[in-house]
Amino acid sequence: MHDHCPNCGENFNPEPGFYWASMFVSYALFTIWTLLTFFIVVQWLDVDLDYYLMGLIPSLILLTPYFFRMARRTWLTLFVAPKPVHKHGPAEQAIARQ
């Protein structure tokens, strides 16, 4: 993960331990995934619970990097407002400074 946004320069590490609580967001993502797949596979498709669990464990392992990034991104979005980037030409920048 970059330290600063390449477009607007926003600091992605506002304070030490900022992303510590994103593990709770990650836990929520794993819980939603587990419940959603359970109701679809076991309840709706009527697959045996043992087969569901044998497929769930690899899917959770494969989705770990994605959920990790989504949890950090969600946590950052909740607490850091993005800075709008205005791309102006030289004439517009001179007018904006006045």
Image: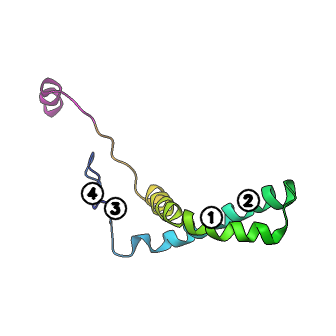
State which tag comes first along the sequence, 3 or 1: 3
98 or 75: nearer the eye?
75
Q: Secondary structure at mark 4?
A: loop
Residue 28 place in picture, x, y as percent:
62, 66
Is 49 on the left or on the right of 96, as rendered? right
By secondary structure, the bulk of the magenta-drawn segment is best described as helix
Circle 4 residue: 4
**Is the Cβ of the residue at disc 3 closer than 8 Å to that at disc 2?**
no
Q: Amino acid at mark 2?
A: Thr
Q: Residues within 10 Å of mark 4 (few under 14, many from 20)?
A: few
**How many marks can you see?**
4
**Is the Cβ of the residue at disc 2 closer than 8 Å to that at disc 1?**
yes
Please provide the residue range marked out in magenta.
Answer: 86-98
**Is the Cβ of the residue at disc 1 closer than 8 Å to that at disc 4?**
no
Circle 1 residue: 59
Q: CA distance from mark 2 to mark 1?
A: 10 Å
State which tag comes first along the sequence, 3 or 2: 3
Q: Secondary structure at mark 1?
A: helix
Residue 31 place in picture, x, y as percent:
67, 67
Residue at left offset 32%, top offset 66%: 13
